[in-house]
Image (cartoon, grey):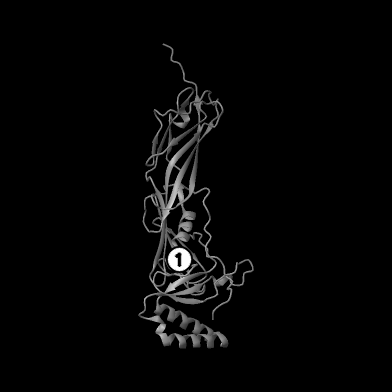
Amino acid sequence: MIRQLVRVGAVVATCVAVVTAGTTTASAGNGKTGSGSTAGGDGSEYTVHVNYTHRGEGSNPQSVKYSAPFTPPVCWYTAMTPDQFKAEIARRYDNAGQKGAGTVYEYYNQVMSDMNTVDYHKGDDGSWWVLTWDDTRLNDPGSPWCAYAQGWLWEPPGNPPQNRITPDMLAQAAYGQMKLPSEGVTLSPPPLNQKVNLPTYVNFTQADAQVSVTAQLTEPDGTVIAATVVAEPYRLHVEAGTPDADPRTCDYTVDGGKLDTAGASCNITYLKASDGGTYPFTADTTWRVWWSPTADVQPMTGNPTLPSGLTETRQDVTVKEIQAVNR
């Protein structure tokens, strides 16, 4: 039955507790979750199953600050082959019969009769697109309305319907999953051995100059949809944590994931000892972020950008006077 203004729940894109070999799996709906990354169904038999692949996050990553949350559609169209669509209609027909839903049963009986006259478009170029929703929240008063009334449609190649799952949606999902390394900033002299009037050199090194997350799923008809989000550090801002320093802050450009401020025109210099306490030396790294509609890492040039990411690190430093040596 073509459902008018189907009420649906949003696809949940939060990570479930499955983390193996750097891969996180997220699923939605209340249906059976199969292997791989798949999409489809009506919330009782099919799921949206997005596979996330993480690269270069380091041992102690931070979630991206200022990241935009993933807002999935409340309903969407899933691509199916003629055989898959035939099986889906048969499933709905059987379910209606088992539940004694006479009107629905008769409706799908007529649908099957009509489809048999065109053989479900077997052998034709194109795909069936089936309206999909989360059945578990069908009657949830807090769920928004689905504005799409047509339950399914046949479309030729290259003409998918609106509100299908797109690389842009997966890019938002991958962005929400991204974590950035919080380590890599070292000081010279070391934090517990800073000296008054001696410049503090900052060394920034990332084992991986880029961090990336790929979100990928496979439609029931075999179509693969993917997006890869890439983050790259490009700016470092440091603060002394006390007014007794000159300068109190410095800004640096990071190139290729590396930075060494020895010889730079700006290096924090403490003017007063911490007198048994510490100063909170902070380093904030800004990451440029972009994405591509592929399953692999692509350069930034020519690809859309996302809001910059920010990671923060703090090191408590002890500053002492330089002791004179009497001879």
Q: Is residue 206 left or right of residue 248?
A: left
59 or 71: nearer the eye? 71
Give percent across and percent down for residue 48. 47, 67
Q: Is residue 180 above or below residue 315?
A: below
Quadrant of image for the C terminus: top left
Q: Is residue 56 left or right of residue 41?
A: left
Give percent across and percent down for residue 99. 55, 84
Asked whether residue 100 is in view, the answer is no
Give percent across and percent down for residue 91. 47, 81
Q: Residue at x 39, y 56 (%)?
A: 21
The residue beneath circle 1 is 49
Q: Is residue 184 above or below residue 39?
A: above
Q: In what element is the residue under mark 1?
A: strand
Please tell me in which quadrant of the rendered image residue 261 appears: top left
Quadrant of image for the N terminus: bottom right
Q: Is residue 320 above or below residue 202?
A: above
- The residue furthest top is 327
Neighbour class for label 1 at 10 Å: few (<14), some, many (≥20)? many
226 or 206: nearer the eye? 226
Q: Residue at x 51, y 83 (%)?
A: 95
Please tell me in which quadrant of the rendered image residue 291 appears: bottom left
Q: Residue at x 44, y 85 (%)?
A: 115
22 or 172: nearer the eye? 172
Q: Which amino acid, by three-letter code, is at mark 1?
A: His
Q: Is residue 2 left or right of residue 141?
A: left
Give percent across and percent down for residue 146. 57, 70
